[in-house]
Amino acid sequence: MPNAKNAPKKKMVKKTVVKKASKPAKTGRQKSKGKIQKPTGKKTAKAPKKQAAPKAIAGESLILVLNPGSTSTKVAVYRGSKQLASESIEHDKAEIEKFHRIVDQYPMRKAVIMDFLARNKVDLKSLAAVVDRGGLLKPISSGTYVINQAMLDDLREAKRGEHISNVGAFIAREIAQQAKAKAFIVDAVSVDEFTPLARVAGLAGMERKSLFHPLNMRMAALRACQEIKKELSQANLIVAHLGGGISISPMDHGKFVDVNNPNEGGPFSPERSGGLPTGDLVKLCFSGKYTADEIRKMLTSRGGMYAYLGTNKANEVKEMVQKGDKQAEEVFRAMAYQIAKEIGASATVLKGQVDAIVITGGVSHNQILTDWIKERAGFICPRFFVYPGENEMPALAAGALRVLRGEEKAREY
């Protein structure tokens, strides 16, 4: 399959979930696509009218939640466990690629977050905590951690790799300092519950790493356990997060005992190459045509669907398939094929004792893709649950709230 030309440039688009109590009104500053939090579908709305900043009531704290993605910045404000406002700000890929390193994006991403707070009339002084999902840190247990200087130093050095989640902690700490609030991460991508066998890489001196999407995957696992009427600690699940990166894990009695590192292996995704033929990769690295940084970008942000079709948007590829584009269909089917194959591999870790297969993440909105996956992997277990989208924002808010309420003690990195 020949490589496609670079995707056409697009203007930044902002999508806003307007606070329920707000009525649309012109502000003269910007136009946003709004979505009222009701099951009636999308509606076009303008920025909300000016109103007093939301205040925390007795026993409830105001929490700012940040979740940077590869091509978007998600931001929300919660009062206790109730979401007051949220927004997903999409960034054009060409804009993102102007930055040499991911951590260099933080001033740009902070600016759009501060704009969100200003438009929603959120006073920084009213914040009790700012929480982010965390980045590629050293192996840590699950839980809520204080963002400290040691954590930021590790993220800036990026010893465990460049990932978009590395940037959020810098923004959270800086805003929290301005607000005189707490700064946390919850269930970072470096949560490590590997068994000893899962760490063996196949070459002495190397070790497989636990890097994935535990925040959303754990929430999806809990939801599946409610349906099968089992405690998470008693269930064996295969959980697949399908997003900009794809993580698939066998969950043994509530623990992520193995997982593909989406930056280095497993299925290819909308923008990551996944596992590659190592011989060809070595030749590419020593061809003299590319720098180490260029190779890294090819593997983590210009691979997968983007390398073949010029877009990292799964919905665009689905539309291409529906219009009869044969190359798009072959690439989309190949991604489903590789996802199903990884699910099958995970079943062997659980020795075939699988209570449910759980599919989640933004790309799982595409039923055509999830149907292809089920067609190949559904035989493993009849309980095949698809929970489109992600629950990372409420999960982050809940992690911070548990600490603020004294139900859980924040960990130190």
Image (cartoon, rainbow, N blue to C red):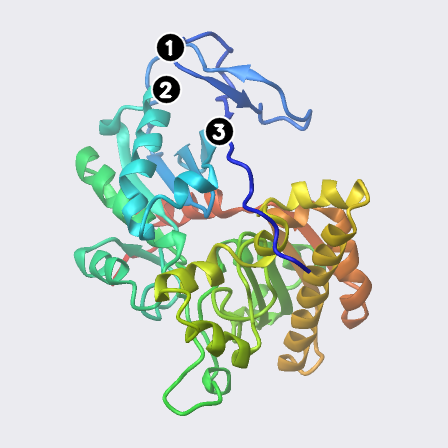
Residue found 57% across the figure and 77% down from its top: 277
Residue 314 lies left or right of residue 398; in this view the side is: right
Determine whether 394 is above or below 59 in the image: below
Look at the numbered disc 1 and give the secondary structure of its residue: loop
Gap in Å between the C-alphas at discs 3 and 1?
A: 27 Å
The amino acid pointed to by label 2 is Arg
Q: Which residue is mark 1?
A: 50
Between label 3 and label 1, give the one nearer the viewer. 3
In terms of secondary structure, where does tag 3 sit? loop
The residues bearing labels 3 and 2 have C-alpha atoms spaced at a distance of 20 Å
Q: Which mark is residue 230?
A: none
| Location of mark 2 (residue) | 119
Residue type highlighted by circle 3: Lys
The numbered mark, 3 or 1, whose residue comes first in the sequence reads 3
Looking at marks 1 and 2 on the same chain, the residue that comes earlier in the sequence is marked by: 1
> Quick one: label 3 or label 2, which is nearer the N terminus?
3
Element type where label 2 sits in the image: helix
Q: Please give the label number shown on residue 11.
A: 3
Q: Nearer the viewer, mark 1 or mark 2?
A: 2
Name the residue: 36% across, 65% down. Answer: 291
Q: Position of residue 324 (x, y in %)?
A: 82, 44
Q: Position of residue 247 (x, y in %)?
A: 55, 63
Contact? badges 1 and 2 (CB < 8 Å): no
CB under 8 Å between discs 3 and 2? no
Does residue 405 show up? no
For the residue marked with disc 1, what is the amino acid? Lys
In the displayed structure, would residue 270 be above or below residue 76?
below
Q: Find out whether the residues at labels 3 and 1 contact each other: C-beta distance under 8 Å.
A: no
Residue drawn at the location 62% of the way across and 20% of the way down: 43
Q: Which residue is pictured at 32% across the width and 44% down the height?
A: 105
Q: Quadrant of residue 338?
A: bottom right
Name the foreground residue: 188 vs 304.
304
